[in-house]
Image: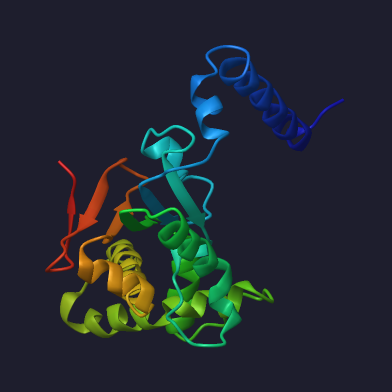
């Protein structure tokens, strides 16, 4: 007798088998090329949320994008000796320095649990009762406090506040990327472009931040 957990696990194994049949027993061109190395041109820092898989959303194949997934797609600012940043930035550093990507994207999304936890904490509630998660989401605290401070003038709904916090956090993470000299130097040379994106789970629309204004707009 099986249960949902067993079925989910078995589905992964079946998926691996289908992938093997398609890419290794069928047309082997793609994987044969990738076995010799990878040359992605885009690095995406995305959330760990199971609903926002960059490969599915952007319709790419293996080798097309270098992906870093972490709760709330947060990027810590550069603080020498702070091991908190290493898990994220080690991957970013490899993508930028070793792979030479031309585009670095921070992609947030709607209904982000990590940003919600950060917003709740900014409102004075207790942080998540987890050893690692609670301290991690505090990285979004500054963005959340800014959005809350603006509320007396904007009078936004809770949903609008959540969206504002998610998008503001994306901009903060993009700014934090610039705190690393090896990123900023490449941006100034024109070798690397930074992007802030936000994906709406409800509508499937992608919003991108203007390079100059930081305002988000729907991709036409």
| Outermost residue toward the top in this view | 26
Q: For this rendering, which residue is in front, 102 or 45? A: 102
Q: In which quarter of the image is residue 18?
A: top right
Left or right: where does residue 86 sit relative to residue 106? right
Vertical relation: 53 (above or below) 95: above
Residue that lies at the very extreme toward the front in this rendered image: 36
User: Residue visible at 57% across and 11% down?
Assistant: 26
Residue in front for this viewpoint, 57 or 116? 57
- Where's residue 171, x and y in %? 29, 70
Q: Can residue 168 be seen in this snapshot? A: no
Farthest residue, direction right: 1
Please indicate whether residue 41 sits to the left or right of residue 49 in the image: left
219 lies above or below 215: above
Point out the image quarter for the C terminus: top left
Residue name at image x 35 percent, y 70 percent: 183
Q: In which quarter of the image is residue 12?
A: top right
**Figure coloring:** rainbow
The extreme left residue here reads: 212
Kindly tell me whether residue 91 is visible in this rendering. Answer: yes
Q: In the rendered view, would you say 130 is above or below 94?
A: below
Q: Front-most of 158 and 1?
A: 1
Question: In the depicted view, which residue is nearer to us: 74 or 141?
Answer: 74
Residue 37: % across, % down:
52, 40
Left or right of residue 31: residue 107: left
The N terminus, quarter of image:
top right
Q: Residue at x 31, y 81 (%)?
A: 148
In this picture, residue 66 sits left or right of residue 216: right
Horizontal and vertical percent for residue 56? 44, 36
């Amino acid at each position: 007798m099986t249960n949902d957990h067993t079925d989910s696990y078995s589905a992964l194994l079946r998926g691996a088998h289908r992938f093997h049949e398609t890419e290794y027993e069928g047309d082997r061109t793609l994987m044969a090329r990738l076995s010799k190395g990878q040359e992605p041109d885009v690095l995406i820092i995305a959330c760990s949320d199971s609903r926002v898989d960059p490969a599915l959303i952007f319709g790419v194949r293996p080798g097309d994008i270098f992906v870093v997934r972490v709760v709330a797609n947060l990027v810590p600012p550069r603080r020498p000796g702070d091991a908190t940043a290493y898990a994220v930035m080690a991957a970013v550093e490899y993508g930028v320095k070793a792979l030479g990507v031309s585009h670095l994207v921070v992609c947030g999304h709607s209904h982000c649990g990590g940003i919600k936890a950060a917003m709740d904490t900014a409102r004075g509630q207790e942080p998540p009762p987890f050893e690692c998660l609670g301290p991690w989401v505090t990285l979004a605290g500054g963005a959340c406090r800014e959005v809350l401070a603006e509320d007396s003038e904007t009078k936004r709904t809770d949903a609008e506040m959540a969206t504002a916090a998610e998008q503001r956090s994306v901009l903060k993470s993009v700014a934090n990327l610039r705190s690393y000299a090896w990123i900023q130097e490449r941006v100034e040379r024109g070798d690397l472009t930074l992007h802030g994106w936000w994906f709406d789970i409800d509508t499937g629309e992608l919003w991108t931040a203007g390079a100059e204004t930081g305002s988000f707009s729907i991709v036409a």
